[in-house]
Image: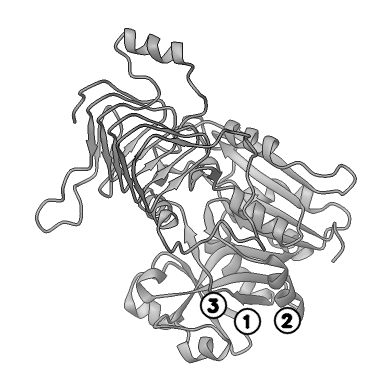
Amino acid sequence: MARSSLISLILGGGKGTRLFPLTQLRSKPAVPLAGKFRLIDIPISNCLNSGLEQIYLLTQFNSVSLHRHIRESYKFDRFGGGFVEILAAQQSQDEAEHDWYQGTADAVRKNLRYIEQHGVEHVLILSGDQLYRMNYAKMLATHKKNKADVTIGALPVTREQAKGFGIMTLNDGGRVTDFTEKPQTEEAIDAVRTDPAWMDARGIKSNGRDCLGSMGIYLFDRDVLVDLLKADDAEDFGKEVFPRAINSQHVQAHLFDGYWEDIGTIRSFYEANLQLAGQNPPFDFADAAAPIYTQSRYLPSSRIGGGKITGSLISDGCIIGENCTIENSVLGLRSYIGDGVTIRDSVVMGADFYQEAHHREGDFSVGRPPVGVGDGSTISHAIVDKNCRIGRNIDFVAPPAPAGAHHAPDADHDWGVLRDGILVLPKNTELPDGWSM
């Protein structure tokens, strides 16, 4: 494969309302993950590990921190031709939408001049907010072997999961014959199910799964993509482009059965992070054959005063006091944890900077908590965004679920939100000593 024959387009996503308030001041792909990474590092690393080094990132909302991360993380040999280039349509949460990207297909259409460059033969379209590891070279091999015009990453899912996916129906050769976006009824799911024996025969253990969901990973012949997008004003690939393409083009499925998670909601973000902190994480960042890359920050080793830490991820540059208990949690870069602090089942994202000693003393002198978690405080079932100031002797603990419910009802507060039973403290929030909900 010539270096310039395939380009990758990573879609930066919309406003990320389901991840709010984590997306209040940043785009979805810029949300921190597993302590020291960001969501955007996943698709970029998959591209690099697949030998693909010509990557465009389409961004729109709150993209300043994402741009900074890309600029400081991904640098290439100037003679090698590799790049991660940002194609920005900058827009804040509150600005009008009519001049900006209206959907996945519309975003790509508005950047066709980069796709139509000389020498481009294939275009790989990816999402910027999913956690998985894939060798895209294998997908390209499937595409070429079947002489396909379009190839879609296909993941086996259960009938219940199928309600949140675009579901494909295939013929015996794996060609897509139908594409249904998020079927909701049993009758609709029956109409698009795949025989589990068909999956088993192709080395994919069905394990009770009888549907094939679109992973949001698309590989196009360049000319086919251009023609499809110029044919009309379709805004979305799943709802509009693919149903039409199936009738006029060879659309192929590429089967995948590794770990894959869409980090699109507070609950999915929270659960994915805690799974990564566990003893047997479903996704391993320490895979030497296909590492996940991120910014090199040159921070000091974390310092731990004493206590008990189990099933947790502790990122670079943390300072943890004495007699602390940290269980099943993630501590992000530069986290400052005081003495006697308890953190359970929580994600604490850390800080963008270190406070010097005299600044911390200055905060104490005016009754303001410094950045970090103060002595004697407890955090449980929570997400604490960057640069928060949590005072001393605070219980930031999710309320219990009422009888018959899985968790307490969602609520908005002046300090943050409760979503799916998880407390979320937005970036730069302050909770003074002794604060209570």
The Cα–Cα distance between marks 2 and 1, rounded to whole angstroms, is 9 Å
Badge 2: how crowded within 10 Å, few (<14), some, or many (20+)?
Answer: some
Determine the secondary structure under disc 2: loop
Q: Are marks 2 and 1 in contact (CB under 8 Å)?
A: yes
Q: Answer with the quarter of the image where residue 425 lies.
A: top left
**Residue 297 position in % (x across, y down):** 62, 35
**Residue 335 position in % (x across, y down):** 44, 33
Q: Quadrant of the C terminus?
A: top left
Q: Which residue is mark 3?
A: 178
Q: Quadrant of the N terminus?
A: bottom right
Q: Earlier in the sequence, mark 2 or mark 3?
A: 2
Q: Is residue 233 above or below residue 259?
A: above
Q: Amino acid at mark 2?
A: Asn
Q: Amino acid at mark 3?
A: Asp
> Residue at left 33%, top 12%?
364
Q: Which residue is mark 2?
A: 146
Q: Which residue is mark 1?
A: 175
Q: Amino acid at mark 1?
A: Arg
**Residue 46 position in % (x across, y down):** 65, 58
